[in-house]
Image (cartoon, helix red, strand yellow):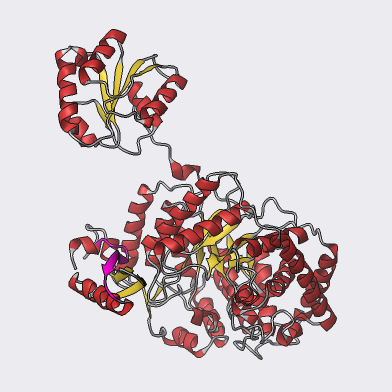
Amino acid sequence: MTSQKKKVLLAPLDPVHDIGLKMIKRGLELAGHDAILLPPDYSPEEIIKAAIDNNVDVILISRTLGYRVAEILGSFIDLAEASGLRERVKIGIGGMAIKPELAAELGFDAGFGPGTTVEEAIAFVEGREYIEKDRGARKTKKDITEKYDYTFKNKRIEKLLNTIADEIIEYVKGKTTPGIERAKIREKMFESDDEAELRQLRKEYAAFCDDIVKAYYANGALKEKTRQLTSEELKALKSYLEKVKTKMKPLNLQHIDTNPVVFIQYGTGCPFMDIAHIKTCEAWGADGVVHFDPSWGARTEGFYEGFITHEEDGSVITYENLKLIKDALMPSTLWQVRAHRGLNTPETVLLAGKVGADLTKINIAYGSLGGGTDPERLTVDAVAAIKYAAKFKMPFDVVTNEELCGVPAHKAFAGMLIVTVLGLKLGARPILQPLFCYSPEVMINGQMKDNYIDFNAAKIIALKRIINAPIWCGAPIGFLTQTEDRVQSSLSTALHASLASSLEVDGISIASADEAYSGGPISAAARVDTLRATQSAFRFFGHAKIIPTENSEVWASQIVEGIERTLESVVKNGSFVDALYKGLLGSREEGAYPGRAGRGTVIKNI
Amino acid sequence: MSKALEKVMDAVDIETFLVCDSEEEARKISMQMMNELGFCNASIVFIQYLGPGARVRVRGYIYKPGERYNWFYDENNSQ
C-alpha cells in the first residue's frame, strides 16, 4: 500500500449491480483499503445514510443506465451537500452512462467513463495522479529464431539435403551475375564519400542495368507512374512522424506468451502512405511489417536511387525509401524486406542489411518456379544473397508460395528445406514459411473438403517431425479463404491465427479485411479490422487448443514421405538447377513454370 | 472535398443493406448512393444478394497512393 488506509463506500445507483464496482472492491482490498459494497437499487438517501453511518472517506457511485442520469446524480450531490458529507468525503462516479464532463458539471470529484481501469479508481481513492503504463515501452523486439538449433529429427532427409546443398555451393563457384556485380558496386558506393569515385561507380553500376534504369543514371528519368518525392513532402513527413510518435501507445495482440508474433504486409506504392499504414498497424498491435516491392521491380535489372513514390501496388526499393521507412518504425517493430524473387536479390539483401532490417526473404524454388526468375540465375544470386543475410545477421524466411501455383505441399517443402540447409551451411538463420492456404492441391484432392484445420496442421506436424526450426506461417494466413466481405475475411484470418497459435508456430502474416478485393489499394481501416480480430481470437483461446482430426497425422506422414521422395529424385538427378528446369520440385503440369527473367545472364569462369 | 473527408486516411467504406430485387439492381443503387453522397470514384468491394435484398460494402477512395494527402500536412507547416 502506497498511501493512508481509506474507507470506501461503493454504491450502485442502479436497479442492477455493476460488475465494475465488484472489481474495484477487490482491487481496493488488495491495495489494503476497507471497501463496503452496497446492494443495488438503494436510493440516494440510503446511500448518504450508509456513508455517514460508516464514516467513510470516499464514495464511489456507479450508474449504468442512461435514463434520468443527470437528474438522479444531481439530486445525489444535493443531498451530499445538505448532509454536510460533501465537505469531508470525496465522491466519484463511474459506469457506462457516465461521461467525465457530466460528472464535473454536476460537482463530482471525478467521473469514470467506459474503459476505466481498477488502477484508475484506486489512484482516485488514494488521492494520487493516475499514470497510465507506457504500453509501447513494454513491447520488445522478438528474435523468432532464438530458441532453435536446427537439429534434424529425420536423418534421412538431413542427409539428402546436405548432398543437394553441397552441390549448389559447388555449382555456383566461379559464377556471377549482373545482380551480384551490382551489389558489389553498391557496397563500394556505401564505403566511398568521394564524389568523383561515386560518379564512376554509378557508371559501372548502370552498365549492369536494364535500359529503364540506365536512363535514370544517364539523365534522371524515371519510368511512368513513378516520381521523386519533393522536399516539401519530405518536410511534411518529418512533421507528421514527430506528431504521431508522441501519440503511440500500441496495443498488444498476444494474450499468452506462446501466441505468435503478427506481421502485416505493406506496399501501397507510396512510402508516405506505407508509413501511415505502418504506424496505424503498430498502434493496433502489429509486431512486424513486411515490405512489398512492385512486380516490375523484380523483373528489372537494377535499382533507382532517391525518394521515389509509385502510383501502383508495390513500394519501390531504394536505399533512401527503405531508410525513410526504417526511421518511422517503433524500436520494437520487426521489419522484413523481401528478396525472394527477381533480379535484384543480392542487392535487396545488401540494402536491407545496410538500412537495418531485421529479416529478409529468400527462396530459389519459389522465385524460379512461381516468381518468374530463371532457375540458374536465381540459384547463383540466392547464394550471394544468403551470404549477405549471414553477414548482416539477418534471418530470412523461405516462403513456399509455389503452392499457390498448384505445386503440392511436399514438393514446395522439399524446395524450402533445400534453401534452409543451404542457408545453414552459409551461416544464416533460415525460417520455414509454410502457407496456411486453400491451395489448388487441396481444392483438387479434397483435403479441405471438411475443414481448413487438418491439412494446415499436417504441414506444421510434418515440418516439426523433420527439423527443429522456427516456423512463420504465411503469407497471408488463410489465403484464398477470405472474401471481400469484411466480417468473413476478418473471421477467417482470426481462425487461421488461432490455428497457427494452437500449433505453436513463431510468427504469422495476416491479411487486411480487403485483401481479396482487387479493385484498389488496401485501406487502413481494413488493416485495423484483422488486427482486432486476431487479438480477439488470441484472447478467446488463451492456452486452449484447436484439435485436428486424425487426418492431420495421416497427411503429415504423407507430406514427410513426399518430401523424402522429392529430395531423392533431386539427388538422383545430380543437379539442383537442372531439377528445377525439369520440374522435379514442381512441374508445368502442376502449375510451376521455370522463370525466364534473367535467363542466360549467369557469367561463368570468373 | 469537405474538411472531414480530408481527414480520412485513404478510403471510406459504406456498409449497408439495400432492399432490392436483384444483384444487378443492388449494384446500380450502390453506385447511385455513392454518387449522391459525393463519391465520384466509387467501387463495390462486396455484394451479396439473397431474398429481401443485398448486403453491400461500397468504397470511395479519398486518396490513392502518391496523391497529396491533406491529413499529412501539419496545418502550421503546409503551404
Q: Report whether residue B66 is seen.
A: no
The residue positioned 59% from the left and 53% from the top of the image is: A501
The image quadrant where one finds the N terminus of chain A is top left
First to last magenta residue range: B7-21
Q: Kindly indicate the quadrant of the structure image that contains residue A457.
A: bottom right
From the viewer's side, name the closer residue of A45 and A478: A45
The residue positioned 58% from the left and 65% from the top of the image is: A474
Name above or below for residue A585 compared with residue A85: below
Q: Kindly indicate the quadrant of the structure image that contains residue A413.
A: bottom right
Residue B24 position, x and y percent, is 31, 79
Extreme front residue here? B51
Name above or below for residue A413 compared with residue A127: below
Q: Kindly indicate the quadrant of the structure image that contains residue A592.
A: bottom right
Residue A341 position, x and y percent, is 59, 77
Residue A265 position, x and y percent, is 49, 65
From the viewer's side, name the closer residue of B12 and A315: B12
Going by the image, does A460 lie left or right of A348? right
The residue positioned 53% from the left and 88% from the top of the image is: A210
From the viewer's side, name the closer residue of A230 and A60: A60
Q: Is residue A134 magenta?
A: no
The residue positioned 68% from the left and 83% from the top of the image is: A375
Q: Report whether residue A106 is seen.
A: yes
Q: Main secondary structure of the magenta part?
A: strand
Name above or below for residue A11 compared with residue A231: above
Residue A437 position, x and y percent, is 58, 68
Q: Is residue B12 magenta?
A: yes
Q: How many marks?
A: 0
The image quadrant where one finds the C terminus of chain A is bottom right
